[in-house]
C-alpha cells in the first residue's frame, strides 16, 4: 500500500496547485502567484530532502550488509562468499560505533521536509538504531549455541541451502568457507566463554541436543567409512548439477580435483573445529543447572521486560500477556467443544484431545513413503490456495515457493516447521520446511493450517511481497518486526476459513489446535521467564491443554527457554490484525473491502503494531471522505 498511499498524497498536492492556477487565470490577480511559487518551492524542497534521505538509507544498508558475508549470501549475492561473519568482540564494538555515527547523520536531515513515505522510513530507522544502541548492554544475554539455532547448524544450513555453485569460483568459495570454520568456531567459543563469565550458561537439557547435532555433522565420508556426509553430498550434487547445466564450466578432471580439495577441508578443518566445539560443550555441561528462566541472570527481569517490548512492539507487561493467554485458551477450548459435538464424539474435551493425539487415522507412517506423501499433500494445499488469492488480495508475490523436509543433521532438534525467504532477486525460491523426524508430531489435521502459515497466504506471501516492494528502502525490505511477521502468519491460518478452507471438521479442529498452541505460548513463556515456572510445569500446561504430541510439547517448552519472549509475538500480532480489521469493518460498513484491507497490511512491509494501527486508521479516514 506504500506506493498507493504516496500517490494519493501527491495527488492532493497536485490538485491544490491546479486550483490555485485556475484562480489566477480567471481573476488575473497576480497576488496569488507568490502562493503558487511558495508551494512549488516547498514541494521541491521536500522532494530534494526526501531524495537525499533515501540515498542515505540505501548507502547505510549497503555498508551494513557488506560487513556481513552471510547476509550477502542470504540475499543471493556472491560478494565475500568465501568468508563467514566476524563474531569477535572488536567487530561488535566497531558495529556499535558505526550505528552511533549513523544515527547522528540520520538526524541531520530535516524531517519536516520529508514526504510521508520517507518520513515513515526515517522514524522507523531512528527507532531501530536507538534501540540497537540502548540494547547493546544486553549483548551477552542469549545462548549462541542452542537446540533451535547456532553456529553448529547454521554453517551447514547456509552452505547447503544458500551457497550456490554456478561456476568454479563458487566451488572454491565453498571450500574456502570450510577451511575458515576453525577460526569461526574459535570466535564462537570466545563468545560462549564471555557468557560463561557472566554466568549465562544454557540449561542442562540443551547440551545433549547440541552435542548430538554437532556430532551428526561430522558423520559419514570423509569423516568415517559411512555414506557421504551432508556437506560432501551437497558439494558433489552441486558440481554434478553444474556439469549438467553448463558442461563447459567443469571437466571431470577438475571435478575430481575439487572433490579432493573439499575432502581435505572437511577432514582437516571442519572435523577438528567441530571436535573442539564439542569438547568445550561437554566441559561446560558440568556447570549447567536445571534453572530455566532468565530471571536467574543478573537483571534478568529487566531484560525480559525489554525483550517483550521489542518482540510484541507493545507496552504490554508479562502479567497482561499471561492473562491474555489464559483467556484465549478458554475461548478456543469452547470452540473446540463445538467441533467435538459436531463429529459426535462421546466424552469431554480432554478425551477428544487424547483421541486426536493418538488415533492412527490422523498420522502418516514414519517411513519414506509417509514423509513423501506429507510433502506432496502440503504442496498441493499451497498450490490450491494460490488459485484463490485473487479473492483475498490485490498484490501477490512473484517469488516461487518450495516445500522441503528439514535436513537429517538437525531434524531431531529443529522446530516443527519454519520458512526461509527467497533471495533478493527471487532466483532462489522461498522454502517451507516441514520437520518430519517424528510423524506423530505432524498430524494430518494440522497440515492445512501449517501450510497456510508457512507458505501461502502466510510467511511466503508476506515476506516475498516485502522484498518485492517498490520505493521502499532496503532496510525495510529485509528487516522486520516479529509481532507483525508472526502475527500475519497466524492470521493466515484463520483467513482461509472465510474462503472455504477447512471443510473437514477435523482440519478445522487442527486450525484451532494451532491457534490454541500460540495462546498457550503467552502463558508458558511468561510463566517460565517471569513467574519462575519450571520446564516440567510448562510441559504439563501444554499437555493438559492441547492435543499435541509429547515430543511437540517438549520442543516447544525448550524453545521458550532459549528464546525468551519470541513466542509471544504470534498471538499478540494476530489479535492486533483482527482488531484493526474489526474496527475498519465497523467504521466503513459497506465500504469495507477485505482485499484493500490486506493491501494496507502488506504493502508497507513489516511495521511496529502501533504504526500499523496508525496506517489503517489513516486508510479508514481516507475512505470515509472519498
Image (tube, rainbow, N blue to C red):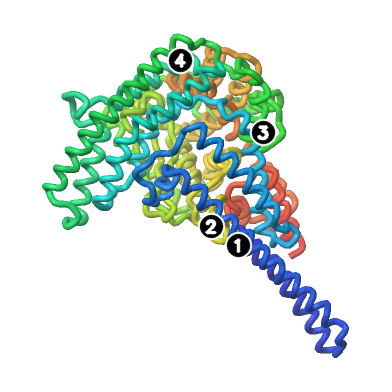
Label for residue 205?
4
Residue 153 in the image: x percent, y percent?
38, 30
Q: Is residue 322 left or right of residue 41?
A: left
Residue 545 in the image: x percent, y percent?
56, 20
Nearest-to-viewer mark from 3 and 1: 3
| Residue at the image point whose x is 71% and y is 31% from the top | 316
In primary-sequence order, the first of circles 2 and 3 is 3
Compared with 52, 556 (above or below) is: above
Compared with 583, 13 (above or below) is: below
Q: Report the residue marked by disc 2.
A: 469
Q: Residues within 10 Å of mark 1 (few under 14, many from 20)?
A: some
Front residue of 66/605: it is 66
The quadrant in which the C terminus is found is bottom right
In primary-sequence order, the first of circles 1 and 4 is 1
Label for residue 3?
1
The quadrant in which the N terminus is found is bottom right
Labelled pair 1, 2 in contact (Cβ < 8 Å): yes
In primary-sequence order, the first of circles 4 and 2 is 4
In primary-sequence order, the first of circles 3 and 4 is 4
Is residue 494 visible in the rendered image? The answer is no
| Residue at the image point whose x is 69% and y is 68% from the top | 10
Compared with 372, 327 (above or below) is: above
Label for residue 309?
3
Residue 531 in the image: x percent, y percent?
65, 16
Gap between marks 1 and 4, in whole Å?
49 Å
In primary-sequence order, the first of circles 1 and 2 is 1
Amino acid at each position: 500500500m506504500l506506493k498507493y498511499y504516496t500517490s494519493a498524497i501527491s495527488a492532493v498536492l497536485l490538485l491544490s496547485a491546479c486550483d490555485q492556477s485556475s484562480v489566477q487565470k480567471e481573476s488575473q490577480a497576480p497576488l496569488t502567484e507568490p502562493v503558487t511559487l511558495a508551494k512549488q518551492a516547498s514541494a521541491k524542497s521536500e522532494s530534494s530532502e526526501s531524495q537525499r534521505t533515501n540515498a542515505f538509507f540505501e548507502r547505510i544498508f549497503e555498508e551494513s550488509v557488506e560487513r556481513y558475508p552471510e547476509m550477502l549470501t542470504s540475499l543471493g549475492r556472491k560478494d565475500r562468499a568465501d568468508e563467514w561473519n566476524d563474531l569477535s568482540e572488536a567487530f561488535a564494538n566497531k558495529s556499535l560505533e558505526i550505528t552511533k555515527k549513523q544515527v547522528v547523520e540520520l538526524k541531520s536531515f530535516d524531517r519536516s521536509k520529508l514526504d510521508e513515505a520517507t518520513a515513515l522510513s526515517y522514524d522507523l530507522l531512528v527507532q531501530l538504531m536507538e534501540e540497537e544502541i540502548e540494547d547493546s548492554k544486553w549483548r551477552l544475554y542469549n545462548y549462541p549455541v542452542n537446540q533451535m539455532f547456532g553456529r553448529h547448524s547454521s554453517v551447514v544450513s547456509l552452505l547447503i541451502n544458500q551457497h550456490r555453485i554456478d561456476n568454479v569460483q563458487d566451488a572454491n568459495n565453498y571450500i574456502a568457507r570450510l577451511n575458515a570454520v576453525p577460526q569461526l568456531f574459535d570466535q564462537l567459543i570466545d563468545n560462549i566463554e564471555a557468557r560463561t563469565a557472566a554466568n549465562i550458561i544454557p540449561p542442562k537439557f540443551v547440551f545433549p541436543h547440541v552435542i548430538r547435532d554437532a556430532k551428526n555433522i561430522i558423520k559419514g565420508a570423509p569423516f568415517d567409512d559411512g555414506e557421504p556426509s551432508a556437506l560432501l553430498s551437497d558439494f558433489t550434487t552441486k558440481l554434478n548439477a553444474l556439469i549438467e547445466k553448463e558442461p563447459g564450466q567443469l571437466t571431470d578432471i577438475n571435478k575430481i580435483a575439487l572433490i579432493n580439495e573439499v575432502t581435505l577441508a572437511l577432514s582437516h578443518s571442519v572435523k577438528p573445529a567441530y571436535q573442539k566445539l564439542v569438547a568445550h560443550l561437554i566441559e561446560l555441561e558440568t556447570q549447567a543447572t536445571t534453572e530455566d528462566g532468565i530471571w536467574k541472570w543478573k537483571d534478568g527481569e529487566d531484560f525480559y521486560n525489554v525483550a517483550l517490548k521489542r518482540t510484541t512492539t507493545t507496552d504490554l507487561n508479562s502479567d497482561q500477556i499471561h492473562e491474555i493467554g489464559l483467556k484465549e485458551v478458554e475461548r478456543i477450548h469452547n470452540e473446540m467443544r463445538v467441533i467435538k459435538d459436531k463429529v459426535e464424539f462421546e466424552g469431554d474435551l480432554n478425551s477428544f484431545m487424547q483421541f486426536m493425539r493418538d488415533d492412527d487415522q490422523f498420522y502418516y507412517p514414519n517411513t519414506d513413503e509417509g514423509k513423501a506423501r506429507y510433502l506432496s499433500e502440503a504442496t498441493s494445499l499451497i498450490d490450491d490456495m494460490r488459485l484463490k488469492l485473487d479473492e483475498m488480495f490485490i498484490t501477490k508475490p512473484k517469488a516461487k515457493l518450495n516445500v522441503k523436509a528439514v535436513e537429517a543433521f538437525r531434524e531431531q532438534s529443529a522446530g516443527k516447521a519454519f520458512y526461509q525467504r527467497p533471495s533478493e532477486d527471487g532466483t532462489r525460491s522461498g522454502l517451507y520446511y516441514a520437520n518430519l523426524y517424528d510423524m506423530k508430531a505432524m498430524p494430518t489435521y494440522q497440515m492445512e493450517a501449517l501450510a497456510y502459515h508457512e507458505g501461502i497466504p502466510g510467511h511466503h506471501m508476506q515476506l516475498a511481497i516485502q522484498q518485492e516492494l517498490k520505493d521502499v528502502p532496503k532496510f525495510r525490505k529485509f528487516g522486520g518486526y516479529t509481532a507483525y511477521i508472526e502475527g500475519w502468519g497466524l492470521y493466515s491460518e484463520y483467513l482461509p476459513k472465510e474462503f472455504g478452507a477447512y471443510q473437514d471438521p477435523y482440519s478445522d479442529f487442527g486450525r484451532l489446535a494451532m491457534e490454541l498452541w500460540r495462546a498457550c505460548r503467552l502463558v508458558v513463556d511468561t510463566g517460565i521467564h517471569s513467574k519462575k515456572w519450571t520446564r516440567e510445569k510448562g510441559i504439563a500446561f501444554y499437555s493438559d491443554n492441547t492435543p499435541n504430541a509429547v515430543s511437540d510439547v517438549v520442543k516447544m517448552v525448550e524453545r521458550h527457554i532459549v528464546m525468551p519472549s519470541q513466542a509471544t509475538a504470534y498471538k499478540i500480532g494476530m489479535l492486533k490484525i483482527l482488531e484493526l480489521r474489526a474496527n475498519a469493518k465497523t467504521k466503513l460498513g459497506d465500504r469495507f473491502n477485505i482485499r484493500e484491507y490486506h493491501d494496507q497490511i502488506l504493502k508497507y512491509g513489516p511495521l511496529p503494531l502501533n504504526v500499523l494501527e496508525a496506517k489503517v486508521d489513516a486508510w479508514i479516514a481516507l475512505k470515509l471522505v472519498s
